[in-house]
Image (tube, helix red, strand yellow):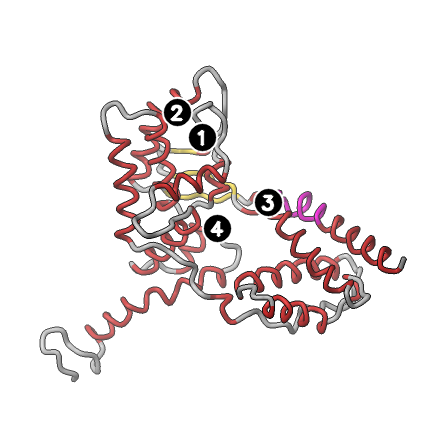
Amino acid sequence: MQARLQQSGNLQIVREYMVFLRVEKGMRPATCEAYRCDLEQFAEHVEGRDGLLVTAGQEDVGGFMESLRSHGVDSRSVARKLSALRGFYRWLLMDKKISHDPTVNVESPSSWKILPKSLAESEVAEMLEKTGVAARVADADGLALRDHAILELLYGGGLRVGEICSLHVEDLHLDTGRAQVRGKGDKERIVPLGRSALEALERYLALGRPELEGTKRERTLFLSVRGRPLTRQWVWEMVRSVSPAGRKASPHKLRHSCATHMVDHGADLRSVQTLLGHADIATTQVYTHVALGRLKQVHRMHHPRGKRPDSGAEV
């Protein structure tokens, strides 16, 4: 009986938090579902010790983290679950349901800030060339034009796959070279579009989209062969299908590649943060170490104790 009461109480508080995330924070259903799964997993851990989410202490959170590690859960997933718990307990504090946050002194795994995997510039170029060849032929069909435009946006604009799927035609402002993107929490940002992306989008809008839309009237920018909005899964599969040999590319890898290559070429973190739509600059800071190779080269070229490329000697 006690166990059923505990489970009922935990599920109820999680449901209330989901309403808060959807209604007040404006989070997308997929994000809310991921948070719900993480919280319910922690609730099971707490219930195993005859506890409730609202009475959990730091030892419960620490024990949960350790349990995840001992079962082989990778550090990045552990860190994500801890982030979900922190958001949940901040809400409980704000709502005065608890008086102490049990996650305050719990450290994230050290790998939390490891740079996400990205592709080499040559590999991205290979993917864009593959879709570009099909899109540039005189009789290119709507699918070829669409796929190339999507790839250009994923890499050129650093968009998330969900942002690609939710773009509307009116969100594009090709005359000024920008797109209005709705990101996490329905936050909007302006993304500049480079020449390659603009050209691909112009051709898709002029020749590809009318073919796919047919007699339907859809606001969504990218359409399926049946004239319906694309799913996230479909975009993932399309990107995977044009991956370089021996690599498994994804929309997320292209987004990370966009940020990595910008930093590597000298972009400042604030600009990259704005482009990607990161709420916190700390999220963008994981890209700083990718410029280490370029920094070493600059040091060798310009520091008085660096090696000069002409003489090979230190001065």
Give the left or right position of residue 108, taking residue 135 as reference. Answer: right
Kindly identify the residue that appears in the image at 40 percent across and 51 percent down. Answer: 253
Kindly identify the residue that appears in the image at 48 percent across and 66 percent down. Answer: 113
| Helix, strand or loop status at disc 3 | helix
Give how far apart the Cα atoms at labels 1 and 2 are: 8 Å
Q: Nearer the viewer, mark 4 or mark 3?
A: 3
Vertical relation: 64 (above or below) 207? below
Location of residue 274 in the rendering, given as x and y in whole percent from the top left corner = 45, 52
Residue placed under numbered mark 2 in the picture: 209
Find residue 221 and name its label.
1
Amino acid at the residue labelled 2? Arg
Question: Is residue 24 located in the magenta-colored stretch of the structure?
Answer: yes
Stretch of the chain drawn in magenta: 18-30
Q: Residue furthest right?
A: 1
Q: Along the polypeptide, which appears first: circle 1 or circle 3?
A: 3
Q: Callout 4 environment at 10 Å: few (<14), some (14 to 19), or many (20+)?
A: many
Location of residue 250 in the rendering, given as x and y in whole percent from the top left corner = 41, 47
Q: Along the polypeptide, which appears first: circle 1 or circle 2?
A: 2
Residue placed under numbered mark 4 in the picture: 277
- Rendered image quadrant of residue 81: bottom right
Question: Is residue 75 located in the magenta-colored stretch of the structure?
Answer: no
| Position of the C terminus by quadrant | bottom left
Kindly identify the residue that appears in the image at 16 percent across and 83 percent down. Answer: 314
Q: Residue furthest top?
A: 215
Q: Along the polypeptide, which appears first: circle 2 or circle 3?
A: 3
